[in-house]
């Protein structure tokens, strides 16, 4: 099946194959073709160009896109999409003055989510997660990473990863799975953190690897959770099974996690709301990709990742949602792009690059998604008739999306 999209107001993020992640000033450039066509065949992008060179073909179904923009789907490289139940009561607690840490102390937070998840069947968990996956696809996400980390027992962590595996099998959008058993120390291991890390490394990780259930390993490296020593052990343990690291670090405190992660060759470091000059230096010396999660800053009213500073230091930047029930209950990448512009002072071009092209590198999917490139998956967004692509972050509460195509098919 072929489709030919014609009279596109502007085709955005058009790139030749084989590009590198965008750093510094190169993030300002959002390559586009005005008055364009896009030709797709089956699940792939076949060709594109200006309308003057549009092909004459009877094999393709022709779709007129006058006044509309086409851009690649968002790549959301950091989510906790698998969870059970809801945490609206904690939301209300916070409004009444309790902090994220107070709520964790009361037995809420991650441990609360873990308790609910442990008691939920695989089938129910799959159904609950699938609803959220469908929602984010409708919001324009065409590739996603999903973490475990609300199980905290061998059985429950494996159950989460099997839900992700089932979604991978049943959906055509690229999904990457991350093993995050080191998300919090469960109650059963209170004051025995080392024993829990031992259990994660010696008992759960080998099973995860054996069953091929994860692409990455993650650690919540934060005061009161997992320290530098734990983080180092887990990154190294993951390496033995060829699992690259994606690390939660510097959400509330900067204490050397960025340096450790970059030195150990972590693939990404995510959060970075608290970022020191030393952290910036560490990022400049390595290839680890910094990922900002502004939805979390918005929801928890904590500082925003200094994205402007990161880019101005000639580093790359990626944006993701951190979709999770506790600190960022939204998978709306368009809103994340808007927040990055409004709160982090990224230009719309930088923010769109961070949420599409650069984000594909954060998942090792740069050959499949992230740009309009011949041979990549036909995963793209068609906007409604809007005056400019800058309307996407500007009209932050509006739904500017008319349709989303995944693997060459419109999603319903
Ligand atoms: Zn997270």
Image (spheres, rainbow, N blue to C red):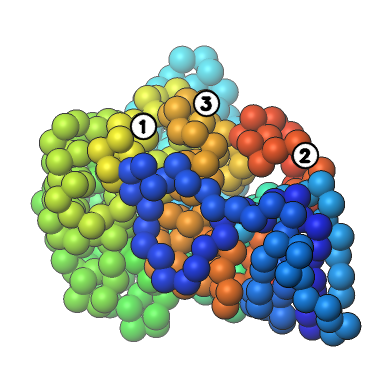
Residue tagged by mark 2? 386
Q: In the displayed image of the protein, which residue is found farthest to the front?
A: 52
Would you say the residues marked 1 and 3 are in contact, meaning their CB atoms lie under 8 Å apart?
no
Q: Earlier in the sequence, mark 3 or mark 2?
A: 3
384 relative to 357, above or below: above
Q: CA distance from mark 3 to mark 2?
A: 20 Å
> What residue is pinned by disc 3?
342
Number of numbered callouts drawn: 3
Q: Considering depth in this image, is 398 or 65 the residue closer to the camera?
A: 65
Q: Which residue is mark 1?
A: 308
- Residue at position x 19%, y 31% from top? 276
Distance from disc 1 to disc 3, alpha carbons, whole Å, reads 11 Å
- Write the residue at 34% across / 83% down: 210
CB at mark 2 closer than 8 A to ligand 1?
Answer: no
Which of these two is toward me, 158 or 244?
Answer: 244
> What percent of the width, then of the height, locates residue 99?
40, 22
In the structure shown, which secondary structural element does the residue marked by tag 3 occupy?
helix
Q: Earlier in the sequence, mark 1 or mark 3?
A: 1
């Amino acid at each position: 099946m072929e489709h030919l999209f014609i009279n596109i107001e502007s085709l955005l993020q058009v790139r030749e194959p084989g590009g590198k992640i965008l750093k510094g000033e190169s993030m300002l450039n959002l390559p586009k073709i005005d008055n364009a066509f896009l030709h797709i065949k089956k699940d792939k992008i076949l060709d594109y160009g200006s309308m003057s060179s549009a092909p004459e073909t009877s094999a393709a179904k022709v779709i007129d896109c006058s006044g509309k923009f086409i851009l690649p789907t968002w790549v959301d490289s950091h989510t906790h999409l698998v969870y059970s139940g809801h945490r609206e009561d904690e939301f209300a607690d916070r409004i009444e003055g309790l902090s994220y840490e107070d709520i964790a102390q009361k037995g809420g937070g991650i441990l609360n989510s873990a308790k609910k998840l442990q008691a939920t069947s695989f089938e129910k968990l799959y159904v609950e997660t699938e609803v959220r996956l469908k929602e984010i696809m409708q919001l324009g996400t065409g590739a996603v990473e999903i973490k475990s980390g609300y199980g905290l027992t061998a059985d429950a962590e494996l159950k989460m990863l099997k839900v992700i595996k089932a979604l991978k099998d049943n959906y055509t959008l690229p999904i990457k799975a991350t093993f995050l058993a080191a998300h919090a120390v469960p109650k059963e291991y209170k004051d025995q953190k080392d024993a829990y890390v031992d259990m994660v490394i010696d008992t759960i990780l080998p099973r995860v690897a054996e069953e091929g259930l994860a692409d990455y390993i993650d650690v919540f490296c934060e005061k009161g959770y997992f320290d530098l020593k734990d983080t180092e052990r887990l990154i190294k343990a993951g390496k033995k099974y060829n699992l690259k690291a994606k690390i939660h670090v510097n959400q509330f405190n900067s204490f050397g996690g960025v340096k450790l992660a970059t030195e150990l060759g972590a693939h990404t470091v995510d959060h970075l709301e608290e970022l020191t000059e030393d952290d910036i230096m560490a990022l400049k010396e390595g290839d680890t990709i910094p990922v900002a999660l502004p939805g979390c800053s918005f929801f928890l009213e904590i500082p925003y990742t200094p994205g402007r500073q990161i880019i101005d230091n000639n580093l790359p930047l990626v944006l993701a949602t951190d979709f999770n029930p506790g600190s960022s209950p939204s998978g709306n990448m368009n809103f994340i792009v808007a927040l990055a512009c409004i709160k982090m002072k990224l230009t719309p071009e930088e923010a769109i690059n961070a949420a599409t092209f650069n984000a594909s590198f954060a998942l090792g999917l740069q050959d499949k998604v992230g740009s309009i490139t011949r041979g990549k998956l036909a995963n793209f967004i068609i906007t409604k008739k809007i005056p400019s692509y800058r309307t996407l972050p500007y009209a932050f509460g509006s739904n500017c999306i008319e349709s989303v195509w995944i693997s060459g098919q419109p999603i319903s």
